[in-house]
Image: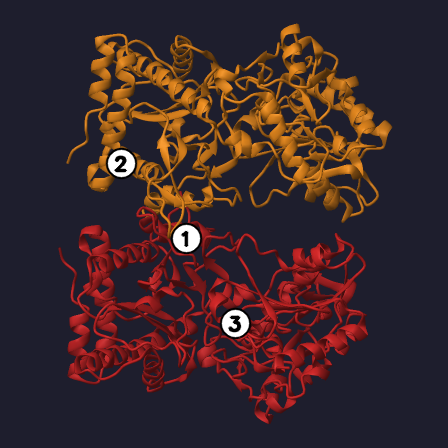
Chain colours: A orange, B red
């Protein structure tokens, strides 16, 4: 019996004891995080599947893993011999988990989940779907504490203060703003589980999640007494004093439920059910005031200090990329072996040479040739390609600096580009430029702009299936809300101060992938006027040239060419003074030469 | 005491008898129609205000009318001396009706409404808002039957059959489709109140609402017995026989409630709460299966017969417009007086000369100069301007033909256009062309395209506040759903066969208004391919030239100029064979001359 078999059998014993017919194990934590600390990798431990998305379902005699098309191949390999069946999410023949359970389980059966890793919103949807088929839900089925002997501890990394000279606003001020919003919503207090919201609110950071400088914690805000629930070992005297000055006590992470149970007797507590564990929302009970996050929007709108910091971080990031791409060219020219994994190591090395560097903001995606067409490609020891002086290389990377977070994608031709490579690249850039040059009235949502990034591709029967842009934190998670630029409707207006990515792409399976990404800042437009109101526009923050060899000028308007040339002028003016060598300056000058017909 | 005072006092007596503290009288009917038959003009009768949008609220000592900015001036005039207070909807200081009631009425008070003219959805929202302030709602307060002595009868116009040679699908086939959809939703029957849905489903028409060829009725569909509730006097023997052959009995309009009450005991009935009277949904009770309209989408996707018919109707409409605009030019050249109201009469006259003409599809909007900037302008005897050979004239008009419904807006320069007139017009046309030339993947919603119609204006700090496009019926209401092209999110994908307007505009208050409108047909695009899937595009249906004198070619791309020239080639080729005189042919040839730099 393999170790996976043994783990699942162990779970089945617990299920049998508790009268659970099926257990659902999602990829999730009590904070609804996008990326999980090792402690929460329950699904990975139970199934052996290491992908970042997937849900395991275990019944008395079957085990099934639902995952999406990114992971069909990897999951099939990793599940081999485990007797766990792969359920290919998104294929028409694949039922949803709810539908499968309703079909397979008899009426009267009970499904178990751990309500700490289900949001209240998700649990409610699940319960409703199951109840329609007379299947009960036990949301207190949490056997992992007993089953997983060598379970990694909760992250114990120290919490440090993100200084106000970078954050631009004190924790006191932010807390006051959120409590004022809660008051409008008729709530006395606010309970927050989202780790990036807590980090932003208190101006604290840690390194609990790879590339995400957050601390594992819950936060309870109240005008007279706020409490941060976290491992006290993470809080040294300096931080404790700092938090106390902001009116925040520290209590053990595990005390949160008891605390809420007590306070819910006297307190109306604002809580976001889509981001808060079902178990905790249940504890708050009828005194919960539910709604969207009060923190997400204030966090997304950056202040002048943050914006000034990001600009400096972007300049340092551009310098690192000059070094990286020069090194790529040198190795290819000199015939020195270069792999996709080498790219990641080099990127980290050059970024770390810059001031205020803390970490990468995500693991670099360096996709050479056909690998570039795999949107969420991440090179492994097995997959990592050698890179040759021909074809396209897609590089998506970023860093966490104390003064800002970066995220940039460039696609470069390593040899003489083909006509198709140039046409494909240019159509993607037309979309990028359409967003970069957009002007739009107050109230415009990202989904209203999304089509502009795609229409040049659409007119050639092409498309990309990911969003065009996501919000970006400030020395925080590289993906944040509430705004985005995407196909799906998101009811959030773009506002000055928001930082969003602009990253259209094109992926030809087995051929190449192209993505062109800058971060852009929403700013008021000088076109604002009395009769038609306030207009906004975007300003590029990212400072690094696009590959001028890849533009097909016959596909571009004069205005589009002018935008590229102006952008490259700005990049050159910004980076030149920061470059250390003549070689670097010469390289950048060459790479930012004007396009002309 | 004026007649309005007397009517409101009469209402107050009924309110006092029934213990009603406030009565809300909306502009509505039991079918949630956009335009109302005279019988349902209760708010107009009670208040004296004749605008198409507005809600009256009457309490024991106050009466208030909420209406939007289109009607601020007109309402102030019409309400003068009535003691009815004007509440300017949309201004920041104006509370919503619910907020006003909650503030003014004591806890425990009762608000009365007639649940037959409130949709179930709207009533629920109202009840929830009031209940939060301990105000009760009596949805059976309908005193008009006793108060309004000379109330116009329900429309008694005859129902006639819309022949299958125009409709392209039998009533039987449509009924079967809708009942099949109901079965999927686990409903035995379907209850429909929307008049255009009933007309489409049964291939019947009438003339109960000005410009909308519908019959006042409810429809109950059931596999064994369907019933049309309408005034039996509207149904002659031929129509009765036709309906019987389609499995549809006729019952009196007033019988609907009793019938539903009986059938709701044995029947699950599909009903759309947003389009069905609250009173009737209440009658159906717990056996109602609620959801979006099952009929709206099938009705919106036109079949080949309908599309062929619309093309023919568009050609005849174009011929009528050639006559209209030639007559405008002749009168201006010869100094013969021409007013906005004359335009409307001439439009109707020339359209009526064409085959299969039944009615106009709405009252022509002919806005000369500053009047063009009033989006919902409708000339009256008092407002109607004389038209002179200078400035811009906006003409929005359409007709009901047996083979299709038209809706076209053209903006023409009556003299030599100014640079601003040309620039404004060209920016609007750039938006029109962006929609006309859009290619988009299956699943794209209208709100994803809307920005493309606006971006050229936005980049000049300009905008328009109405939608870019609405669905259009087939010999039916000129506004229909479910699709649209607009700023607001509408979760409906565009599909081949849908007919939608493409009508960006620009309105400079006190100066001029510009709108450029064609109807466009969604069609599959030849760019569809295996890797990126199915793409769709639009094809213009409307056949009449845009004013070539108004284009500023310096603002246009070569592709945009080419689109105009190609469109004008098609217009010329379509209309020339249908024109009767050399003058007309010469005029059209001149008006469709190519733009060239």
Contact, mark 1 vs mark 2 (Cβ under 8 Å)? no
Is the same chain shared between marks 3 and 1? yes
Q: Nearer the viewer, residue B178 or B25?
A: B25
- Report x, y in % for residue A539: 36, 32
How many angstroms separate mark 2 from mark 3 (CA)?
A: 56 Å
Chain of the residue that carries numbered disc 3 in the rendered image: B
- Report x, y in % for residue A562: 22, 35
Q: Which residue is mark 1?
A: B450
Q: Nearer the viewer, mark 3 or mark 1?
A: 3
Which of the 4 image quarters holds residue A13?
A: top right
Mark 2: few, some, or many residues within 10 Å (few <14, many ≥20)? few
- Report x, y in % for residue A33: 61, 26
Q: Residue at x 25, y 21 (%)?
A: A572
- Report x, y in % for residue B435: 35, 56
Chain of the residue that carries numbered disc 2 in the rendered image: A
Q: Nearer the viewer, residue B488 or B354?
A: B488
Q: Is residue B405 left or right of residue B98?
A: left
Would you place residue B309 above or below residue A559 in this image? below
Q: Residue at x 24, y 18 (%)?
A: A588
How many angstroms separate mark 3 from mark 1 (CA)?
A: 26 Å
Mark 3: few, some, or many residues within 10 Å (few <14, many ≥20)? some
Decide if residue B420 is in sight here: yes
Q: Which residue is mark 2?
A: A420
Q: Which residue is mark 3?
A: B52
């Amino acid at each position: 019996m393999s170790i996976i078999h043994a783990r699942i059998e162990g779970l089945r014993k617990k299920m049998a004891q508790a009268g659970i017919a099926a257990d659902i194990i999602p990829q999730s934590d009590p904070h609804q995080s996008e990326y999980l600390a090792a402690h929460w990798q329950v699904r990975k431990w139970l199934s052996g599947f290491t992908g970042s998305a997937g849900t395991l379902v275990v019944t008395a005699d079957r085990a099934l893993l639902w995952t999406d098309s990114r992971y069909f191949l990897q999951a099939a390999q990793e599940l081999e011999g485990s007797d766990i069946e792969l359920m290919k999410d998104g294929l028409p023949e694949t039922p949803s988990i709810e539908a499968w359970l309703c079909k397979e389980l008899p009426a009267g059966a009970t499904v178990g989940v751990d309500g700490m890793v289900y949001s209240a919103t998700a649990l409610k949807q699940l319960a409703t779907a199951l109840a329609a088929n007379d299947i009960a839900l036990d949301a207190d089925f949490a056997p992992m504490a007993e089953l997983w002997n060598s379970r990694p501890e909760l992250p114990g990394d120290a919490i440090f203060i993100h200084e106000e000279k970078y954050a631009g606003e004190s924790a006191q001020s932010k807390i006051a703003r959120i409590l004022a919003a809660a008051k409008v919503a008729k709530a006395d207090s606010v309970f927050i589980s989202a780790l990036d919201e807590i980090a932003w609110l208190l101006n604290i950071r840690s390194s609990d999640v790879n590339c995400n400088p957050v601390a594992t914690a819950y936060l309870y805000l109240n005008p007279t007494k706020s409490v941060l629930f976290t491992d006290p070992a993470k809080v040294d005297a300096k931080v404790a004093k700092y938090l106390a000055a902001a009116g925040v006590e520290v209590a053990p992470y595990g005390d949160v439920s008891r605390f809420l149970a007590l306070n819910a007797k006297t307190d109306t507590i604002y809580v976001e059910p889509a981001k808060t564990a079902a178990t905790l929302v249940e504890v708050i009970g009828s005194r919960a005031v539910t709604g969207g996050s009060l923190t997400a929007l204030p966090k997304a709108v950056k202040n002048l200090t943050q914006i000034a910091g990001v600009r400096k971080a972007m300049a340092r990031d551009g310098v690192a990329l000059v070094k990286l791409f020069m090194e790529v060219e040198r190795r290819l020219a000199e015939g020195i072996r270069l792999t996709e994994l080498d790219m990641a190591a080099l990127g980290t090395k050059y970024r770390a040479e810059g001031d205020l560097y803390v970490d990468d903001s995500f693991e670099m995606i360096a996709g050479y040739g056909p690998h570039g067409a795999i949107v969420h490609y991440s090179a492994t020891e097995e997959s990592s390609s050698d890179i040759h002086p021909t074809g396209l290389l897609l590089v998506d990377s970023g860093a966490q600096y104390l003064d800002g977070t970066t995220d940039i994608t460039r696609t470069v031709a390593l040899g003489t580009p083909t006509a198709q490579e140039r046409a494909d690249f240019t159509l993607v850039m037309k979309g990028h430029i359409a967003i970069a040059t957009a002007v739009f009235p107050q109230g415009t949502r990202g989904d209203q702009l999304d089509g502009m990034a795609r229409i040049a591709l659409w007119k050639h029967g092409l498309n990309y299936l990911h969003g065009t842009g996501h919000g970006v934190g400030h020395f925080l998670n590289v993906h944040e809300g509430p705004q985005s630029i995407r196909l799906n409707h998101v009811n959030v207006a773009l506002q000055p101060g928001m930082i969003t990515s602009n990253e259209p792409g094109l992926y030809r399976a087995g051929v190449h992938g192209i993505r062109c990404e800058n971060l852009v800042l929403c700013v008021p437009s000088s076109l604002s006027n009395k009769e038609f109101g306030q207009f906004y526009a975007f300003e590029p923050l990212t400072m690094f040239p696009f590959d001028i060899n890849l533009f097909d000028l016959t596909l571009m308007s004069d205005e589009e060419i002018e935008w590229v040339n102006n952008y490259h002028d700005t990049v050159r003016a910004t980076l030149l003074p920061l470059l250390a060598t003549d070689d670097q300056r010469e390289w950048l000058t060459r790479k930012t030469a004007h396009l002309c017909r």
